[in-house]
Image (cartoon, rainbow, N blue to C red):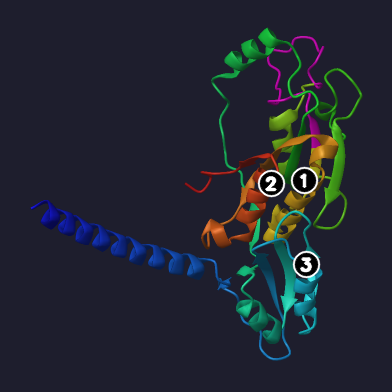
């Protein structure tokens, strides 16, 4: 009897293992399919034409990866040191080569995006924050860098000085959309004020009934302009800003990136180059705060 039971158990175990192997095989095949050169909503170029694309690689691309594009009459628009993505103009031949390259994860259009904002009302918890602020003393964010990736910042505004001081806390500025690093749209200055504004406008003034402070009024601000005068940008400009923030992380002790911008979701985050840039920042040890919920 024990031998019969033993044989039944063996057969049962073998069936279970066989089914498990089949499931694993299916999962692996699905995984390979998911991580193939996924092409999403690209207007394919005809002979003599090019298409603008963002290419996500499985690892940081090398000169050889870029050369495969230029050898097929494509053009390099931008490369990024800390994000495994490249920005190209591709010919039909270059696109076909990228699609067949096992090291390419996805090929995406350079999608437009914009600042995220909405009407809001005054916070009912202001007094609670004021009590918290007064209780611990004014050392909020000292030595920390916050990268504001937005429409630029009006760095001359007094609220970006140290509290009751003329020392400016906007320690670095760069534009990825051309022009200067000022804020023609107004969104980036507003966001920077929420994150790190120190109310120097009302400080010391008589008969002030309410002051307005940011979350970390002693933090340094890194101004990375990726949106233009209309509040518009592209995946490529934002990826460039994120890539620069990662590069400057140790120089300015950047611990936080703020991205109050976005666009509709078009594909899985696994093959979305913008999502992968955010992932690279997180892996570099930076907290990434992203707008969410503005569109319901």
**Circle 2 Cα neighbour tier, 10 Å, few/some/many (<14 / 14–19 / ≥20):** many
Residue drawn at 67 percent across, 53 percent down = 277
Residue drawn at 58 percent across, 72 percent down = 37
Q: Which residue is mark 1?
A: 245
The region drawn magenta spans: 200-221
**Are circles 2 and 1 on residues that touch, CB within 8 Å?**
yes
Tally of marks: 3
Marked residue nearer the N-terminal end (2 or 3): 3
Specify whether 277 is left or right of 4: right
Specify whether 24 is left or right of 97: left
Magenta stretch: includes residue 212: yes
Closest to the camera, between mark 3 and mark 1, is 3
105 is higher (above) or lower (below) than 155: below
Q: Considering depth in this image, is 93 or 136 the residue closer to the camera?
A: 93
Q: Which residue is mark 2?
A: 281
Q: Secondary structure at mark 1?
A: helix
Specify whether 295 is left or right of 178: left
**Are circles 2 and 3 on residues that touch, CB within 8 Å?**
no
Marked residue nearer the N-terminal end (3 or 1): 3
Magenta stretch: includes residue 70: no
The numbered mark at residue 162 is: none
The image quarter containing residue 204 is top right
Q: Which residue is mark 3?
A: 62
x and y percent of residue 150 in the render? 73, 46
- What secondary structure is the magenta-colored segment mainly? loop
Residue drawn at 61 percent across, 47 percent down = 116
**Circle 1 Cα neighbour tier, 10 Å, few/some/many (<14 / 14–19 / ≥20):** many
18 is higher (above) or lower (below) than 51: above
């Amino acid at each position: 009897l024990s031998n019969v039971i033993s044989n039944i158990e063996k057969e049962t175990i073998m069936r279970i293992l066989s089914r498990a192997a089949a499931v694993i095989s299916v999962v692996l095949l699905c995984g390979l399919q998911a991580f193939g050169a996924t092409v999403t909503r690209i207007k394919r170029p005809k002979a003599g034409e090019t298409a603008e694309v963002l290419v996500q690689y499985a690892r940081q691309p090398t000169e050889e990866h870029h050369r495969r594009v230029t050898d097929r009459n494509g053009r390099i628009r931008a490369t990024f040191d800390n994000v495994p993505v490249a920005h190209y103009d591709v010919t039909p031949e270059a696109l076909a080569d990228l699609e067949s390259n096992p090291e390419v994860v996805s090929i995406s259009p350079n999608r437009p995006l914009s600042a995220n904002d909405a009407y809001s009302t005054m916070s009912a918890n202001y007094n609670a924050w004021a009590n918290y602020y007064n209780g611990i003393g004014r050392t909020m964010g000292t030595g920390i860098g916050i990268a504001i990736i937005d429409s630029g910042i009006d760095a001359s505004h007094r609220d970006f000085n140290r509290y009751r001081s003329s020392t400016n806390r906007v320690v670095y500025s760069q534009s990825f959309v051309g022009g200067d690093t000022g804020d023609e749209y107004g969104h980036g200055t507003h966001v920077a004020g929420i994150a790190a504004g120190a109310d120097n406008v009302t400080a010391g003034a008589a008969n002030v009934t309410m002051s307005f402070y940011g979350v970390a009024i002693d933090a340094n601000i890194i101004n990375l302009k990726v949106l233009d005068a209309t509040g518009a940008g592209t995946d490529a400009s934002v990826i460039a800003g994120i890539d620069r923030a990662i590069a400057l992380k140790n120089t300015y002790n950047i611990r936080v990136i703020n991205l109050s911008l976005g666009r509709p979701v078009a594909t899985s985050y696994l093959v979305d180059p913008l999502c992968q840039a955010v992932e690279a920042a997180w892996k570099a040890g930076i907290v990434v705060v992203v707008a969410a919920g503005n569109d319901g």
